[in-house]
């Protein structure tokens, strides 16, 4: 569950940042739209504090209600929903709701304080303007040359409307950055969600098909091994014998890790049973004398690499320092490998007690009376998929929430864009633009910003996925991040779909603009 906890922190931080930005845009726009009302209050003699208090109370109330509903949803509704799904698949103990006051109150405090600061800054900015100026409509931003306009080779090939679009995009710089940042964050979260699912799916294939190739690992008493080998031969099985026992790894800082040691007398047949691959060059490893070969994650946890010397202690408390021959590719669990000559030199007699078996009769051989313990690879694979099914449900939920956040971001920014430019849109209607041309005039800007943000969000999501190898660092799991190319397509397509949906919804708002009302002078 540590992996899910780490993911929850990552997603929560990104969600919080984007949600705060959207809220700040909304509250800032609300106050700017009330500039005439603020001017009226000032002209009537209300103090700056009294006027600001109105918006602070509104912001505090709306923020507090939102935070309370969010905590209820996050700490009660969603956990109950997830556990209702888990209970249909697993036998789990009684579900107990746990409230984390530090995280819940901390996130709410950041949210509310950000809103309060925005309200105060926007109001103070308005208070510096005279009431007469505030009661007049805000003058549009002055036009200015954009960077691309200084490149005649490109600019001269633009049509008139494309030139207008380019100028509008860069004229409203706050909207430009907020749209790109918000959509970028949502796209990146979608990539992370899909990437984690792809990584879990690939991890299972790599571990249980590319690395572990044997069907059965059976442990017997050393005296019974020969008899068990005869049973395996009668069943037409291929096998290789080895000695397996617990061992403790210790680095130079006295940090330890307990795992299993696999000792082979002959590694010539290993390729058919287990793949020992050097992570530095991808070549198959041959077990050399006086060297030990350890899986990659153990090296990461204890901080050693190929060529270092590490201390091994066996079950008889015999310790020995051995040079690391290579770090072996592996994802689940940690293992130590060496040949019998090295084991005899450092720990004593070599007594094989395990068979790695490839056979269609693996289940029958696992049930032999001679077997003390047995592990079927098919069972391990099934248990892995069941265990990570919980994470997959969480990932599906996070993907859905990321998609919903993308819709909220685009809807908020689009509606703000239209409300800020109502007089401009009314003007082009008066000039004879048809409704579909007005739609295209606005939608083109939104789509350009959305596509730009998607193109930036895809590599950002891949970068965040890359960080998860360190975030999800666990003693028994090396989480190799892998993203299927189609996952980038899904992430971009979902964001683009919501952008198109928002554009369609905004058509009604554009159609409802009354040129006569919008262009009416306040005098």
Image: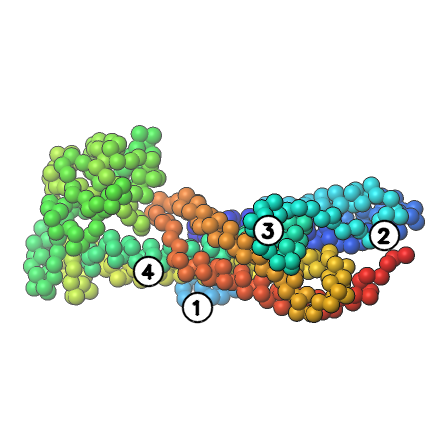
* Percent position of residue 85, x then y: 47, 66
Give the Cα separation between the discs numbered 4 and 1.
16 Å
Mark 1, residue position: 88
Mark 4 vs mark 1, foreground winner is 4
Instruction: Characterize the local packing of mark 1: few (<14), some (14-19) or many (20 or more) Cα atoms within 10 angstroms.
Output: few
Looking at this rendering, what residue extends furthest in the right direction? 44
Q: Mark 3 vs mark 4: give the one in front.
A: 3
Q: Which color scheme does this rendered protein use?
A: rainbow
* Mark in the foreground, 2 or 3: 3
262 to 389, vertically: above or below:
above
First of labels 2, 4 by sequence position = 2
Q: Which residue is mark 3?
A: 155
Q: Residues within 10 Å of mark 4 (few under 14, many from 20)?
A: few
Quickly name the residue at label 2: 136
Dot 4 or dot 1, earlier in sequence = 1
Q: Residue at x 33, y 60 (%)?
A: 383
- Residues marked 2 and 4 touching at CB (< 8 Å): no
Earlier sequence position, callout 2 versus callout 3: 2
Q: Residue at x 65, y 58 (%)?
A: 160
Residue picked out by circle 4:
383
- The reply to whether dot 3 and dot 4 touch (C-beta < 8 Å) is no
């Amino acid at each position: 569950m540590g992996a899910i906890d780490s993911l929850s922190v990552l997603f929560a931080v990104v969600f919080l940042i984007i949600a705060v930005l959207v809220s700040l845009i909304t509250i800032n726009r609300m106050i700017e739209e009330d500039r005439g009302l603020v001017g009226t209050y000032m002209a009537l003699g209300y103090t700056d504090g009294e006027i600001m208090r109105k918006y602070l109370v509104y912001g505090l109330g709306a923020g507090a209600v939102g935070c309370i509903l969010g905590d209820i949803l996050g700490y009660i509704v969603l956990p109950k929903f997830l556990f209702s799904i888990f209970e249909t698949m697993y036998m789990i103990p009684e579900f107990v709701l746990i409230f984390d006051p530090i995280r819940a109150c901390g996130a709410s405090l950041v949210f509310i304080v950000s809103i309060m600061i925005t309200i105060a800054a926007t109001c103070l900015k308005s208070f510096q303007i005279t009431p007469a100026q505030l009661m007049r409509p805000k003058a549009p931003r002055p036009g200015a040359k954009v960077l691309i306009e200084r490149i005649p080779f490109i600019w001269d090939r633009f049509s008139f409307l494309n030139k207008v679009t380019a100028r509008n995009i860069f004229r409203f710089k706050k909207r430009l950055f907020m749209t790109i940042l918000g959509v970028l964050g949502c796209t990146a979260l979608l990539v992370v969600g899909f990437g984690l699912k792809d990584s879990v799916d690939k991890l299972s294939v790599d571990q249980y098909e590319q690395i572990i190739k044997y069907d059965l690992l059976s442990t017997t008493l050393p005296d019974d091994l020969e008899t068990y080998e005869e049973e395996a031969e009668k069943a037409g099985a291929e096998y290789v014998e080895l000695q397996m026992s617990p061992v403790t790894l210790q680095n130079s800082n006295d940090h330890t890790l307990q795992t299993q040691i696999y000792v082979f007398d002959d590694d010539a047949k290993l390729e058919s049973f287990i793949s020992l691959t050097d992570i530095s060059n991808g070549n198959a490893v041959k077990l050399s004398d006086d060297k030990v070969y350890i899986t990659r994650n153990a090296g990461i946890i204890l901080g050693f690499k190929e060529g270092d010397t590490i201390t091994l202690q066996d079950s008889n408390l015999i310790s020995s320092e051995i040079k690391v021959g290579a770090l072996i590719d592996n994802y689940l669990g940690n293992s130590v490998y060496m040949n019998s000559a090295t084991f005899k030199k450092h720990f004593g007699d070599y007594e094989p007690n395990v068979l790695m078996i490839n056979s269609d009769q693996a289940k029958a051989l696992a049930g032999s009376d001679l077997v003390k313990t047995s592990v079927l690879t098919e069972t391990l694979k099934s248990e892995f998929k069941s265990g990570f099914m919980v994470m997959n449900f969480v990932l599906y939920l996070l993907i859905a929430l990321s998609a919903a956040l993308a819709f909220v971001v685009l809807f908020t920014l689009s509606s703000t864009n239209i409300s800020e430019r109502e007089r401009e849109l009314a003007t082009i209607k008066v000039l004879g633009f048809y409704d579909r041309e007005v739609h295209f005039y606005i939608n083109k800007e939104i789509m350009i910003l959305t596509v730009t943000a998607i193109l930036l969000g895809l590599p950002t999501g891949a970068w965040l996925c890359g960080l998860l190898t360190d975030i999800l660092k666990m003693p028994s799991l090396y989480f190799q991040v892998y993203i299927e190319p189609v996952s980038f397509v899904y992430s971009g397509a979902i964001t683009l779909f919501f952008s198109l949906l928002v554009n369609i919804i905004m058509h009604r708002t554009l159609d409802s603009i009354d040129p006569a009302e919008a262009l009416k002078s306040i005098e």
